[in-house]
């Protein structure tokens, strides 16, 4: 892949192939870690009504407001296109969970992929009917369907409640802290389970994309009236992995039938303990051409999030930092959501979207979890460290160089006709 | 592959049935059958299996890709010609090499008319390599091939490079004779001494003694692909970082800089990138000497520090923390409890189509559908259940 870590120039070359009217699927990943949200409440602790309402209650109120705005946003996404879909995954410091679709049955209804499960099934479906029109009708019957009003209501009631419950579990968890260590995992980390939430989100997107691609190919095939070849074209109907997965990307076919994207709404700082799985998610999203939008909420002039900056940069998503977010100023969130994140990937090409002026590509030290701009990298496993060490803590290899040779590193490699590097005299 | 090892063993196939139009480029290509996909999945599984063992791999690689552009490459036993098939395979290889070996470097050399020349210098830009290959194909294939000249050139290039990286020569050779100025075995001995491995993919359709001995002596691999598909398969074997014997590599810590991507605001003048001398507003600043550079990865022009972005390194970390292979479990739609089982990642019902298969993660015991299993292992490289379960294996 050329320029793999760079923002892909445009998608104009694929535009000709892809119809402009692709439906979207938006997976909202909401970070519900309590201690991060508490910051917005604590900063106004000296306000007169601070005593009247306890901090925790104020926080719950704030999150309820945020949820209400997210619901408005999700409904707006649904209203943009008859076949648009939204999903919601939330995480706190204890776990990540999919809230929308709320159940297996709901997911089944949303993806409508029982007939699309295997390439064979589609081929069968297409041979069953008599005329092309019949077959198209049948495919239509199995198209994703949603009762707009019911989904909107579902988002409004059930999900809000469930999400608030999730908040409660965290509050209890915080109270128990170390006592519940056996149940909640060895480490009581303050990081939200963002990598888990993103993994769930991408699995959902993979399912949606592969289903939609299979359907789109089937329809395209039927429309070309070459039906008699259908049975003999397993490749066209997607292989065992589904057309949305790796083999399609390997060939560079980025024209997914669904315009899927992820929107992360998070008030948290970087999750240093999750760097590897977080980046794995981003590379996977990049391979699937799924933009990851990041909406980072901050109290004042707090720092940028290195993780989310890199995520947006790698996947061509939008990174936005909402400053001065507060309990009495929650409206600015909705404004940003509607203004920046509603446009789908196709529409964004003709809009002026916020560009990142700065992307922090500094590494995280594997040992101290510190951010470093100058470090030592193990030549065997590529893990980076702030300080020099005798053996690699990650892969266990012992480094052979003496202190003197180490000082001389790195050699002015790899020019063609240089003198042998200092390291080559040892060993 | 299975039974169809050789082209002449294949049944008469209606090859036009497999042709498919690439929607992006409009080019026609053969589609991949389900059997091939299954085979590919198994191959990946076994590769992962090897990785999980305590095999150390040289993540940092310097590779010389040496191609034969002699007269013998005009032969048409591969269509449209050997040269075109080999260049196509090489271009695909270059692309995937940089994707899977993020901080490795490649140099391409070629032999024609009995001498060896550098087609594309050592670098980390696959686009330049791919273009150089196409350009060279346009020049044509003529004269004799010289294995020794290729090896001598490769040796000269790799000998100057540091020992912490694995140093390899991959030769794709189409001639059954080599026109050498001296004793090729002396060169091979020298390569072995320098711990440079020579691997050979011989597209001449027959084993050639000197090629085989070159790879044997230096600990490399030797393949004789019988058709185009075979060739691609064998080239793919060299994408994975090689297993490293403890004595061949001097592991070391390398000083690296991780600069921040900055934009110069419009009230200040743009700065000249010290590498290509073009004025730019977007670029990186070397953390050691503050040189302004337009792109990474690069060796800082001023102080020689290797500059990269942390995602470059992170791309290969999934090799370090692989997701364990999921165990297959059958789900019969009959049992009451089975009806409730669903994939814990995508919520797909596991018993929907009657009898089916589920995949269970041995680490977190979560169940997944087969589609998610492939996705998790081939693209995501995270188990959602393990991420959720508080197993902080990265600490
Ligand atoms: Zn290491
Ligand atoms: Zn410098
Ligand atoms: Zn699944
Ligand atoms: Zn697991």
Image (cartoon, coloured by chain):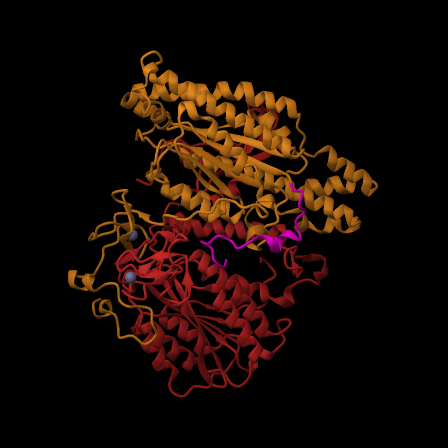
For residue B317, say whether it is visible.
yes
Q: Establish if B150 lies above or below B340.
A: below
Span colored in magenta: A1-22
Residue that lies at the very extreme toward the top in this rendered image? A52
| Side of B24 relative to B300 (left or right) | right
Check residue A6 for magenta coloring: yes
Q: Establish if B165 lies above or below A335.
A: below
For residue B354, say whether it is visible.
no
Q: Quadrant of the C terminus of chain A?
A: bottom left
Residue A357 vs residue A120, the one in the foreground: A357
Residue at coordinates 55% horizontally, 30% vertically from top-left?
A73
Residue at coordinates 48% horizontally, 27% vertically from top-left?
A331
* Chain coloured red in this rendering: B
- The tint chain A carries is orange
Q: Indicate the position of residue A170 as horizontal and vertical percent values.
A: 37, 22
Residue at coordinates 78% horizontally, 50% vertically from top-left?
A224
Check residue B85 for magenta coloring: no
> Residue B229 lies in what quarter of the image?
bottom right
| Side of A373 relative to A82 (left or right) | left
Residue B277 vs residue B184, the one in the foreground: B277
Q: Indicate the position of residue A71 as horizontal and vertical percent values.
A: 54, 26
Residue B386 vs residue B282, the one in the foreground: B282
> Residue A260 lies in what quarter of the image?
top right
Q: Indicate the position of residue B219 as horizontal and vertical percent values.
A: 37, 68
């Amino acid at each position: 892949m050329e320029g793999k870590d760079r923002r892909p120039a445009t998608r104009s070359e694929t535009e000709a192939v892809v119809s402009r009217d692709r439906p979207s699927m938006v997976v909202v990943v909401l970070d519900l870690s309590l201690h991060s949200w508490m910051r917005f409440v604590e900063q106004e602790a000296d306000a007169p009504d601070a005593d009247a309402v306890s901090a925790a209650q104020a926080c719950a109120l704030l999150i309820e407001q945020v949820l209400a705005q997210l619901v408005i946003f999700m409904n707006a996404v649904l209203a943009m296109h008859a076949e648009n879909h939204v999903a919601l995954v939330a995480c706190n410091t204890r776990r990540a969970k999919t809230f929308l679709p709320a159940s297996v049955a709901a997911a089944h209804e949303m993806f409508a992929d029982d007939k699309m499960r295997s390439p064979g099934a589609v081929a069968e479906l297409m041979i069953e009917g008599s005329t092309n029109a019949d077959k198209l009708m049948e495919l239509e019957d199995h198209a994703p369907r949603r009762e707009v009003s019911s989904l909107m209501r579902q988002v409004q009631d059930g999900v809000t409640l469930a999400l608030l419950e999730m908040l409660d579990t965290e509050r209890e968890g915080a109270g128990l802290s170390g006592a519940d260590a056996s149940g909640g995992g060895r480490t009581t980390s303050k990081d939200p389970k963002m990598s888990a939430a993103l993994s769930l989100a991408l699995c959902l997107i993979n399912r949606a994309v592969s289903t939609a691609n299979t359907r789109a190919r089937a329809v395209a095939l039927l429309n070309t009236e070459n039906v008699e070849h259908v049975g003999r074209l397993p490749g066209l109907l997607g292989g065992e992995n589904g057309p949305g997965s790796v083999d399609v990307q390997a060939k560079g076919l980025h024209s997914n039938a669904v315009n899927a994207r992820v929107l992360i709404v998070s008030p948290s700082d970087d999750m240093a303990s999750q760097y590897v799985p977080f980046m794995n998610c981003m590379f996977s999203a990049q391979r699937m051409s799924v933009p990851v939008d990041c909406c980072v909420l901050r109290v004042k002039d707090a720092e940028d999030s290195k993780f989310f900056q890199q995520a947006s940069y790698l996947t061509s998503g939008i990174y936005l930092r909402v400053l001065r977010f507060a309990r009495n100023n929650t409206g600015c969130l909705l404004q940003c959501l509607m203004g920046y994140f509603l446009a789908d990937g196709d529409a964004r090409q003709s809009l002026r979207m916020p560009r990142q002026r700065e992307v922090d590509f500094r590494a995280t030290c594997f040992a101290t979890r510190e951010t470093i701009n100058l470090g030592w990298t193990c030549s065997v496993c590529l893990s980076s460290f702030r300080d020099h060490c005798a053996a690699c803590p990650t892969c266990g290899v012992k480094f052979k160089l003496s202190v003197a040779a180490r000082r001389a590193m790195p050699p002015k490699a790899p020019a063609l006709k240089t003198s042998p590097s200092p390291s080559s005299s040892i060993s | 592959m299975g039974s169809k090892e050789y082209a002449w063993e294949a049944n008469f196939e209606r090859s036009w049935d497999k042709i498919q139009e690439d929607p992006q480029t409009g080019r026609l290509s053969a589609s991949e059958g389900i059997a091939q996909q299954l085979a590919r999945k198994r191959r990946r599984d076994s590769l992962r299996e090897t990785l999980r063992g305590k095999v150390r791999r040289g993540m940092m690689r310097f590779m010389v890709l040496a191609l034969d552009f002699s007269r013998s490459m005009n032969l048409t036993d591969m269509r449209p010609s050997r040269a075109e098939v080999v260049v196509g395979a090489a271009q695909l290889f270059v692309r995937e090499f940089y994707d899977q070996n993020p901080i490795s470097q490649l140099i391409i050399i070629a032999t024609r008319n009995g001498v060896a020349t550098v087609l594309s210098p050592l670098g980390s830009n696959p686009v330049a390599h791919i273009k150089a290959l196409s350009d060279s194909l346009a020049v044509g294939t003529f004269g004799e091939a010289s294995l020794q000249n290729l090896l001598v050139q490769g040796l000269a290039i790799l000998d100057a490079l540091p020992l912490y990286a694995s140093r390899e020569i991959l030769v794709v050779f189409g001639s059954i004779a080599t026109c050498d100025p001296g004793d090729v075995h002396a060169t091979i001995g020298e390569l072995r001494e320098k711990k440079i491995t020579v691997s050979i993919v011989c597209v001449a359709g027959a084993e050639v003694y000197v090629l085989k001995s070159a790879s044997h002596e230096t600990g490399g691999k030797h393949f004789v692909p019988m058709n185009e598909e075979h060739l691609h398969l064998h080239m793919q074997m060299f994408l994975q970082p090689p297993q490293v014997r403890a004595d061949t590599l001097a592991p070391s810590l390398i000083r690296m800089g991780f600069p921040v991507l900055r934009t110069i605001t419009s009230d200040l003048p743009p700065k000249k990138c010290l590498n290509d001398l073009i004025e730019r507003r977007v670029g990186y600043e070397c953390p050691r000497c503050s040189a302004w550079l337009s792109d990474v990865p690069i060796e800082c022009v001023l102080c020689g520090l290797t500059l990269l972005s942390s995602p470059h390194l992170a791309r290969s970390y999934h090799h370090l923390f692989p997701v364990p292979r999921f165990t297959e479990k059958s789900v019969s739609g009959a049992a009451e409890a089975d009806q409730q089982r669903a994939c814990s990642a995508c919520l797909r019902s596991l018993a929907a189509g009657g009898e089916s298969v589920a995949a269970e993660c041995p680490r977190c015991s979560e169940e997944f559908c087969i589609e998610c299993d492939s996705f998790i292992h081939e693209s995501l490289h995270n188990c959602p259940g393990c991420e959720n379960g508080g197993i902080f294996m990265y600490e």
